[in-house]
Image: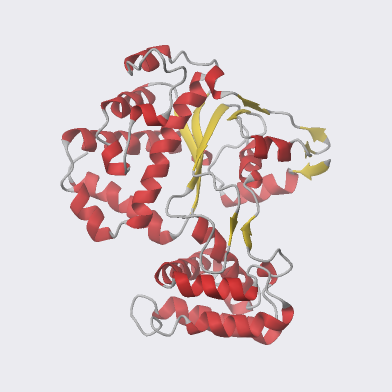
Amino acid sequence: MIDFQINDLRKTTKMLAPTADFDAAYTFYYDETNNIKKFYVRESDFNYTFTANFILGGLVHEGEIPNVQSLIDSFNLQKTVNEVKFKHIAKGEFLDCLKSEEMRLFLQYVKESNLYVHYFSLNILYWSIVDIVDSAIVNSEAAQQLGIHFANYLKNDLYKLSRKELELLIELFYKFGYPNIKSDSVLPFIEELTSLFDGYIDTREFHVGLESLRQILKEAGKKGSLPFIMDEEDNILLKNLSNFYLTPIYMFKNSTHIFDNENDISNILKDYRILDEGNEIKNFTFVDSQTNQLIQLSDIFVGIMGKLTNYLNTSTREKIEIDFNSLSVIQLTNIDLLIDIINKSLKKNEGFINNIDSDEERSKMDQIRNIRKKNGI
């Protein structure tokens, strides 16, 4: 049994998100999409195509459980369907899903009800490379003084470079057993990594970020230390997803958390005793989604969010501009409703939404918001 002390973790997170209310009592319902189980480097590729983010989330409410039967009835599903799933509501890629009338019914209902949405979104490639930057910064007093925005700027440029040089990055990671760089390989790893910068470092887009990162990586090389990418397992970038399930459980310790059955995760969490100043927290359960309508409806929400992240991660800004200026009425209605329910939920509690993603991909969502704002929503 692992004693998992949450006090210091909650204090740190509260400092990073001072406007979020983590102490209120809610009931959270969860489903997930793009559950990769484990992410690792192979000789010529990763074990998983990561263009869509892992999404864990769904619906949340205060007080009594709302009756959502009228919404489910409005979908007019076949009588043989014993639980609502995203696939019954929308099909295809993100823009195709926005054509669904059933999606409109769902989003409109959430907007007008006492329900909110919550989600955690993980860009898997971004997660896999950010420890390089953090390992460099911890070796540089000057870089540490520049704060989190500078760190995120470097991470964003490294992410953009990684997308462009993915094959060479995979080759490099596999060669050095990343994220388990051996002490005698720190300098060679840094030299080979920074050689990937050569074709980009003199461009206006990349110069400041990559040159800064190269310099602080040089400092780390002289010290022979990249602490966050050493003493790990060879080639294992993400061992499992259990920490991302744990986080809302301990952050919203006064709430109830109801997860769709996920045996891998529930078996891991069985070994944890979550302790708050000595008091054990038992605020979560795993249930069969067939028995819980709000988990079924959560599947719809995480489904559309998964499709959205795939669209953002694979679309240029130019493509987004063209796409969103040529949508049908129903597509425009649905994207506006999706934005509305996310805004509604953020207004209720900023702690409901958590993204681990690059500024590059986040900015594309901002672009969509700005396009719709410009067109008068």
Q: Find residue 186 and report its horizontal and vertical position in percent.
A: 66, 80
Does residue 370 appear to the left or right of 178 in the view shown?
A: left
Q: Nearer the viewer, residue 131 or 215?
A: 131
Residue at the (27%, 59%) spot, across then down = 317
Above or below residue 180? Residue 240 is: above
Does residue 14 appear to the left or right of 233 in the view shown?
A: left
Q: Find residue 367 and report its horizontal and vertical position in percent.
A: 29, 53
Residue at the (35%, 15%) spot, across then down = 78
Q: Is residue 233 visible?
A: yes
Rendered image quadrant of residue 204: bottom left
Count of numbered badges drawn on the protein: 0
Q: Nearer the viewer, residue 261 or 298?
A: 261
Rendered image quadrant of residue 313: bottom left
Q: Nearer the viewer, residue 266 or 365?
A: 266
Rendered image quadrant of residue 208: bottom left
Does residue 321 appear to the left or right of 298 in the view shown?
A: left
Residue at the (32%, 29%) spot, across then down = 103
Q: Nearer the viewer, residue 140 or 302?
A: 302
In the picture, the quarter occupied by the C terminus is top left
Above or below residue 123? Residue 339 is: above
Residue at the (17%, 34%) spot, across then down = 329
Above or below residue 146? Residue 184 is: below
In the picture, the quarter occupied by the N terminus is top right
Q: Is residue 144 visible?
A: no
Q: Find residue 99 and report its horizontal and vertical position in percent.
A: 24, 34
